[in-house]
């Protein structure tokens, strides 16, 4: 298969996988931590879009605003921004293309995202204020990503198998450092490291750290069984969901501790993606309808 055909095929798979997922909603909880004890309360359905795909939350580390994608009846997928302080949301991208995986860039001036144009999906960045979007990495079909700094990007790259790659934007190089990985890629608070999930056959995935300068990989802990989404709190705890339950892990406890059961308390279930606000006082949770 020619490279261009391969890019198109992989991009199509990414697009179809997002549209074909079950109907989901994005809820925003208050998050409170007292030592090793964490609690959630006051859920707000910020997507409020029944019967459609609402997903992929992430927070602005600058303003605390929540980014997520939401599907309309066409079915167009756009980036929305929710302001927790005001309780308002806007359609940020609002154009003819589909966008996924919105992430604030390190300079705080752009939202990077996967954008589908003419059947091909690439990583772009949109200016938050004014200006035209530009392609960030023209030669990779990226599903999910995290910024190490303005010049260094770590990405889940679609393929067989899917790979973890470090992109040096100024040098225009892409380096494969792991394969058969999960979709959850995050900056580790208080460090220069990136976390990712290393899948294992017949066993829970490993949550691992990556040093982008040396490509050194170390294991942090074993993930929850049958879970692939996680988030970091500012003080270095990990939160994961399993079914309708939320769990936390810390370096001091070295164990998964249940912190909430959303089905019995809030009638919510099917937890997938998670995101924690920059102050550690908000938790975004994606659930099935």
Image (cartoon, rainbow, N blue to C red):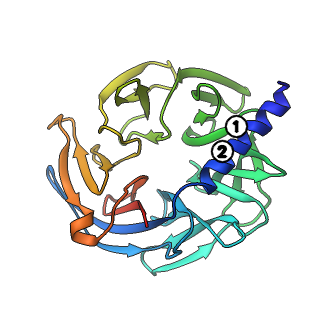
* Residue 22 image point, x, y percent: 51, 59
Residue at x 32% of width, y 47% of height: 240
Q: Secondary structure at mark 2?
A: helix
Up-down relation of residue 87 to residue 33 (above or below): below
- Any part of residue 138 in sight: no
Relative to 140, residue 93 above or below = below
Residue receiving disc 1: 141
Q: Nearer the viewer, mark 1 or mark 2?
A: 2
Residue at the (43%, 67%) spot, across then down? 289
Q: Are marks 1 and 2 in contact (CB under 8 Å)?
A: yes
**Residue 47 visible to an observer of this rendering:** yes
Residue 27, x across and y down, in percent = 40, 68
Image disc number at residue 178: none
Left or right of residue 250: residue 113: right
Judge left or right: residue 59 versus residue 167.
Answer: left
Residue 128 shown left or right of residue 285 in the figure: right
Mark 1, secondary structure of its residue: loop
The residue indicated by pointer 2 is: 14
**Crowd rating for badge 2 (residues with CA inside 10 Å; few <14, some 14–19, many 20+):** many
């Amino acid at each position: 298969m020619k490279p261009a055909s391969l890019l198109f095929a992989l991009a199509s798979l990414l697009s179809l996988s997002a549209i074909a997922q079950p109907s989901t909603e994005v809820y925003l909880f208050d998050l409170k931590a007292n030592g090793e004890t964490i609690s959630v309360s006051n859920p707000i359905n910020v997507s409020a879009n029944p019967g459609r795909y609402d997903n992929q939350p992430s927070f602005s580390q600058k303003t605390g605003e929540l980014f997520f994608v939401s599907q309309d009846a066409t079915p167009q997928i756009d980036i929305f921004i929710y302001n927790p302080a005001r309780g308002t949301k806007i359609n940020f991208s609002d154009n003819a293309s589909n966008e996924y995986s919105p992430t604030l860039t390190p300079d705080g001036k752009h939202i990077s995202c996967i954008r589908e144009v003419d059947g091909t999906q690439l990583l772009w960045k949109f200016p938050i204020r004014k200006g035209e979007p530009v392609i960030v990495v023209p030669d990779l079909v990226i599903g999910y990503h995290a910024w190490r700094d303005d010049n260094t990007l770590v990405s889940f790259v679609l393929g067989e198998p899917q790979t973890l790659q470090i992109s040096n934007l100024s040098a225009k190089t892409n380096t494969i450092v792991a394969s058969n990985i999960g979709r959850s890629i995050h900056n580790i608070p208080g460090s220069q490291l990136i976390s990712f999930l290393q899948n294992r056959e017949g066993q829970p995935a490993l949550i691992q750290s990556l040093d982008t300068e040396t490509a050194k990989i170390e294991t942090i802990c074993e993930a929850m069984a049958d879970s692939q989404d996680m988030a970091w709190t500012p003080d270095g705890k990990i939160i994961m969901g399993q079914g309708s339950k939320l769990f936390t892990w810390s370096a001091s406890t070295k164990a998964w501790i249940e912190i909430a059961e959303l089905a019995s308390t809030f009638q919510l279930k099917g937890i997938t993606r998670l995101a924690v606000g920059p102050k550690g006082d908000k938790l975004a949770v994606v659930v099935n309808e």
